[in-house]
């Protein structure tokens, strides 16, 4: 059975995508959040990014052909923007750290 045949993998991918999309929509109002709201938003973004990093690592370590193809496609897409998956996560981490430093009391 391939990774994409797993109901658990499909469910996790759907939940991750929905959570990320919801946060991106919510993030449009980030500037209107109070300090507590900004902290909650950042914490949720960190959680989603960690889940995404783990999800991608599973694909990277998998022997499944489709998982390997998915990772190669992602690497190709990111390389068109001059970045790698690790650089993408590093950049997001730096952004979230900067956002945290801006809300320190």
Image (cartoon, rainbow, N blue to C red):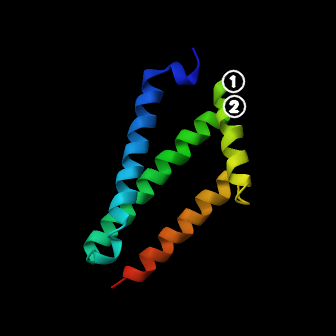
Residue 30 drawn at (x, y percent): 34, 71
Q: Quick check: marks 1 and 2 in contact, CB under 8 Å?
A: yes
Q: Is residue 19 left or right of residue 56?
A: left
Residue at label 1?
65
Q: For label 1, count other residues whose C-alpha is less than 10 Å away and answer few (under 14), some (14-19) or many (20+).
A: few
Q: Nearer the viewer, residue 73 or 53?
A: 73
Q: Is residue 37 left or right of residue 16?
A: left
Classify 10 Å Cα crowding around label 2: few (below 14), some (14-19), many (20 and above): some
Q: Residue 58: give x, y in percent of width and height.
A: 59, 35
Q: Quadrant of residue 25?
A: bottom left
Q: Quadrant of residue 33?
A: bottom left
Which element carries disc 1, helix, strand or loop? helix
Estimate the x, y position of residue 65 in percent, counting from the top left: 69, 24
Q: Residue at x 54, y 43 (%)?
A: 54
Quarter of the figure that contains the C terminus = bottom left
Q: Foreground: 59 or 77?
A: 77
Mark 1 vs mark 2, CA separation in Å: 5 Å
- Point out which mark residue 68 bears: 2
Q: Is residue 21 left or right of residue 95?
A: left
Q: Position of residue 39 (x, y in %)?
A: 33, 70
């Amino acid at each position: 059975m391939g990774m994409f045949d797993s109901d658990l993998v499909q469910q996790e991918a759907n939940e991750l995508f929905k959570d990320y999309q919801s946060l991106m929509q919510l993030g449009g109002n980030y500037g209107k959040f109070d300090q507590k709201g900004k902290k909650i938003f950042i914490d949720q973004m960190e959680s989603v990014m960690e889940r995404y990093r783990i999800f991608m690592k599973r694909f990277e370590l998998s022997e499944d052909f489709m998982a390997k193809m998915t990772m190669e496609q992602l690497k190709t897409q990111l390389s068109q923007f001059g970045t790698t998956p690790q650089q993408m996560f590093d950049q997001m981490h730096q952004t979230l750290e900067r956002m945290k430093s801006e809300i320190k009391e």
